[in-house]
Amino acid sequence: MKSFKPELLLSFKSYSKEQLVKDLIAGLIVAIIALPLSIALALASGVNPEQGLYTAIVAGFLIAAFGGSKVQISGPTAAFATIVAGIVAVNGMSGLAVATIMAGIILILMGVFKLGSLIRFIPYTITTGFTSGIAVTIVIGQLKDFFGITYAEGTVAVETMEKAEALFANFSTFNPYALLVGGICLAILILWPYVSKKIPGSLVAIVAGVALVKLARLPVNTIGDLYTISSSLPKFVAPDLSLSTIGALLPDAFTIAILAAIESLLSCVVADGMIGAKHNSNMELVAQGIGNIGSALFGGIPATGAIARTAANIKNGGRTPVVGIVHAVVLLLVLVVLMPYAALIPMPAIAAILLMVAYNMSEWRHFLHIVKTAPKSDVLVLVLTFLLTVIFDLVVAIEVGLVLACVLFMKRISDTTKLRKWDEQGDNSEYRNIPGNTAVYELSGPMFFGAADEILKISVKSDRSCIVLRMKGVAAIDSTGLKNLEHIFAECRDKGITLILSHLNEQPMKSLEKAGLLKVIGEENICPNIDAALARAAELAK
């Protein structure tokens, strides 16, 4: 059970007063950063603003308490916005709660069965493609509030393409005052880091937006105009766990779980590089599962590790999970005391914050670098994942992207499997004496179902007494490869030809032994190297 010990307990072994002070300061700063982001991401997800804080408070506390990273800060993130909005639009908050709880259970099972390391098998092209696609969907979703556009009554705009269509159809209704407020807030977000890095630009932009709308009395929608703000504490909500609901929401649950696992573990890897530590990936997955279940039971939305907030924690001296707990407690106090004032925040200011979030997560430089330098197959996976994320949704993008990546990978690997015949007149004649009536073939590359037909190219002619198959370059063989090897042996046996295998590696040796081929071929015809194989062929030739 050592592998499932939370980092919080391990950190207390060498905890000091000096570190406590640093953690308290870092927790306060991270909470200030998380406050506007949590509200903005809740609105982008189609839920009430306080539900973003519920998520940061409950999930942030639980994941910090049970997590496998020293510095991970968790809460609502932009990656979930489109998914959550779609689930809420179709199934409501009760459906979202069920999907999030199931995702939490999946995450816990992934951690218990130690699948944390398997995340590395998801190709970089897919993570970049869907991350860039999510950024585009966020941008499209926020243009309505940024420009102050009013949709015609009865307009349905849930999917990204529906939102884009509605924007074009109703663009004539845009509000210049909303654009002014949004433009000023966006400018502050871009320029403020050059002024101060201690105070988050998002907080400054919100204060400036509120002041501008109130003092100038601009006709711009605020959060209070569109939503009912609640400052009540998170309340336990029993979800509707019927079989029909579970079956309908299972694909969404898997999407949430996979995305939460990918994003949180990527955040942990980035954090490890910044502090020179190593996280416990399986414990982190268990904690993410616990945090998401807790968030759903108390009215929150899906949560995961947030790279930006985690980096802010590290830069401000945080080095233990105490920071995540402090940040959750500070947000709880803000919820109770200051939440009613969130009603004054202009919607264009929220849109500006989310546009900046989308830009920062878009990874457009990495996207272009892959397009310019990667093989065409990788570019195809990248672009297809990106387009499917924007046009359809993340579920389709990940499914198609993974299938295509696997097929292309198998094609690439199969291309490396080659069969070459040794020729007495070729370059091997200088140090090999091939006995008469003997053919020597060399097989290199994995013998799996995608390349197993390569071995069938061996020419089995009756005028030969031996065929030597050198397998030094074959690291692995599967059942299809075994079947084809057995076919070649049977063909040789029918024509009175002895098949000699040279240099069997560990995995092929065990596979042949398990399949009974070693006994059939004969142990005397299994040689440790090519010299022994040629000597055996010469002995048979006599």
Image (cartoon, helix red, strand yellow):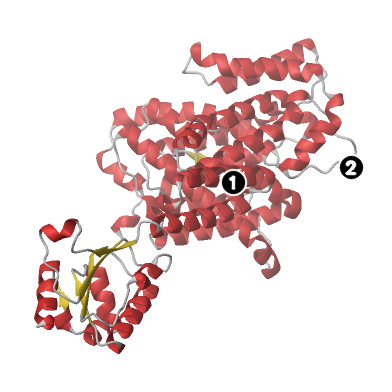
Q: Tell me what residue is drawn at x 31 percent, y 78 percent.
A: 460
Q: Nearer the viewer, mark 1 or mark 2?
A: 1
Q: Tell me what residue is drawn at x 62 percent, y 56 percent.
A: 252
Would residue 44 appear left or right of 523 to someone viewing this image?
Answer: right
Q: Earlier in the sequence, mark 1 or mark 2?
A: 2
Q: Position of residue 417 (x, y in %)?
A: 35, 60
Locate the N terminus by quadrant.
bottom left
77 or 119: nearer the viewer: 119
43 or 225: nearer the viewer: 43
Q: Which residue is mark 1?
A: 384
Q: Which residue is mark 2?
A: 154
User: Callout 1: helix, strand or loop?
Assistant: helix
Snapshot quadrant of residue 165? top right
396 or 421: nearer the viewer: 421
Q: Tell me what residue is drawn at x 57 percent, y 17 percent.
A: 190
User: Callout 2: helix, strand or loop?
Assistant: loop
What amino acid type is highlighted by mark number 2? Gly
**Can the viewer see residue 231 in this picture?**
no
Locate the C terminus by quadrant.
bottom left
Would residue 273 appear left or right of 422 to someone viewing this image?
Answer: right
What amino acid type is highlighted by mark number 1? Leu
Q: Position of residue 441 (x, y in %)?
A: 25, 68
Q: Position of residue 70 (x, y in %)?
A: 36, 40
Distance CA(mark 1)–CA(mark 2): 32 Å
